[in-house]
Image (spheres, rainbow, N blue to C red):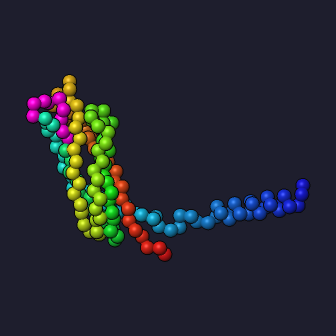
Amino acid sequence: MDRTLVFGIILFLFGLMLGLSIPWESHSPVQETVLSISDSTHSIGSAADNSTDVQLYSYNFTLYNHGNEEIYVEYAEPVFSEEFGKLLLSDDHRVYVNKSIIPESTVQISGDAEFNMTDLSKEDIFQIETFTTEIEVNSMFIMPFP
């Protein structure tokens, strides 16, 4: 075998071993979870005065910034349970916030979703255990360069 090829293979293996030995996770994560939901409410009511087939699920929650940096929130979107999601009349439930939350402050987010209650009773709706499973938040913060 050619010496240049052997030297190249040895150099490649040495670089691979060196790359794998560097502690890549020795630093703290870039962004810790600094937003939390401090309060939430939801309600169900008729979406139209003359029809009970379409109901309105309204929600309100408070995002709290317990970090040290200001965080810009572009939007928040509830993620609905699979069971409740099948009843929804629309797929887009994104609430555009477009606000900055300074440390130790909150922002209120409200929205609603229409759902189909045809052939369902009030008891059927109450048997749905979870309407909202989580909130997806699209946020951005500026961190100083070390």
| The N terminus sits in image quarter | bottom right
Q: Residue at x 49, y 75 (%)?
A: 146
Identify which residue, 74 or 45, lies in the foreground: 74
Magenta segment? 49-57
Q: Residue at x 29, y 53 (%)?
A: 96
Q: Is residue 115 magenta?
A: no
Residue sitting farthest toward the bottom: 146
Q: Is residue 50 magenta?
A: yes
Q: Residue at x 89, y 57 (%)?
A: 2
Q: Is the magenta region chiefly helix, strand or loop?
A: strand
In this view of the protein, can residue 123 be seen by the observer?
Answer: no
User: Does residue 32 appear to the left or right of 126 in the view shown?
Assistant: right
Q: Position of residue 4 (x, y in %)?
A: 86, 61
Q: Position of residue 93 (x, y in %)?
A: 29, 44
In which image quadrant can residue 100 be found?
bottom left
98 above or below 134? Answer: below
12 above or below 102? Answer: above
